[in-house]
Structures are given as C-alpha cells and as structure tokens.
Amino acid sequence: ETAPPETEIITQAVTSASQKPTETTEVITTAESTKVTAESSAPQSSVTTKAETTSAESAPPKKYDYTCLFEIECRTILSNMDKLSKDKKECVPDDGVLFSAETGFDKGESVYDILKRVCDENGIQLETSYSPAFGTRYIEGIGNLYEFDCGTASGWMYTVNGEYMNYGCSSCIVSDGDKIAIRYTCNMGNDLDLQ
C-alpha cells in the first residue's frame, strides 16, 4: 500500500552493535489527515510503516471529551535570524507561530499525542525520536525547524501551564483546560519567558 502523493513518510531505525533497535525516528509531512504507525521489530531491526488516509467527508469530526490551549511557536528565531541556517528562513512564519488554537483531546492523551495529531491535521512536518532508555519521545524538528538550526543551544522545549517539564512529551499526560506550548529556543531556554 502506498501513501498518496501529498503525504511523505520517512522512517528510519538506528541499530546498536547487538542489532536491537535503539531509536526510531519518524518524519511526517501531510496535506490531509493521515494516520501513521511505525513499529520496530527485534533482531533484524526491520521497520514496518502503515499509512491510512481518511477523507474528511467519510467521517464526522471527532468529538473530544476535553480541551486545552495548544501552541507551537518559534518567536525567538525572529530576533536571531542571523544565526538561523540560510535554507531555513522560509520555514519561520512572520509572527513566529506555527499553530495556536483550542484543541480537543481524550482522557489519558499525552502532549505528544496531541502534537502529532495537530501536525497531521494541519500539514505541519514533525520529526521525533523514541528513546527506549527513557521510554519517551524527543522532539527533533517541527515545521522543518530542527535543533541546532539557530545555534548550538537551539531546539524545541515544551511547557504545561507555564512550567517547563523535565521529561519527554510522550510521558506528560494532559488535563482538561491545560495550556500547552511547544516552543523553539535559541539559547537552551534562557531566551524563553514563562507564558
């Protein structure tokens, strides 16, 4: 089964000397709502990717039990354009906001679950890696803006109700009414104010 032309899916497995997968990286770029599942299987480290596209006309919009305010932003880059990789300038929105809206979710969903769905539904590129040692996902790139694209101390961080979390986004369960911000920093978080 192949993905439609407007969907690009790249999955790669990084293996250790023992040939067991240590990290799975998933890149998703969509123009329509696309559901992607990547699974790693042991010793041969093969990766199976399944893509299923659902037409918005074939199913009514999902009703969620809860809502949160969800934002993906890179405003710090606007005052650090001189540090930004030249080929990334077109990736930065004029106001530095890739997404901002009240978003529905179901009980038990993590920040990563909501981030992945928001990116899928809005055609925003997302790349994360899974770390078995920590049992969580790490955000490498959103909207084609990656860690180190705007200096050696740059990358993505996230807050829940203004508090920076010290664990991965797939381990953070969201509560009704939370304010989630996925934010790009150019200086290890020192350039970000609490919002």
Image (tube, rainbow, N blue to C red):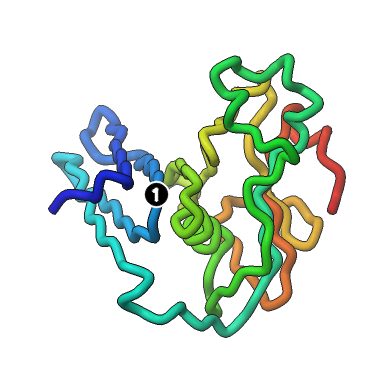
Q: Element under label 1?
A: loop
Q: How crowded is the residue under tag 1: few (<14 C-alpha within 10 Å), some, or many (20+)?
A: many
The picture quadrant where one finds residue 147 is top right
Camera-side residue of 136 and 125 = 125
- Residue 16 in which image quadrant: top left
Seen at 31% across and 43% down, the residue is: 9
Q: Which residue is mark 1?
A: 30
Q: Amino acid at mark 1?
A: Thr
Residue 80 point in image, percent of width and height: 77, 22
Say whether residue 181 is left or right of residue 113.
right
Q: Using the image, determine if residue 116 lies above or below residue 130.
A: below
What residue do we see at 16% from left, 49% from top? 2
Q: Quadrant of residue 29?
A: top left
Relative to 174, is 171 above or below? Answer: above
In percent of the image, x 84 and y 53: which residue is there?
A: 195
Q: Nearer the viewer, residue 15 or 11?
A: 11
Judged from this view, the residue extending furthest toward the front is: 57
- The answer to whether residue 91 is left or right of residue 175 is left
Residue 95 horizontal/vertical position (percent): 75, 40
| Residue 109 picture location, percent across and down | 53, 70
Q: In percent of the image, x 34 and y 39: which residue is there?
A: 22
Can residue 178 be seen from the camera position used here? yes
Residue 25 at x, y percent in the picture: 38, 40
Observer able to see residue 170: no
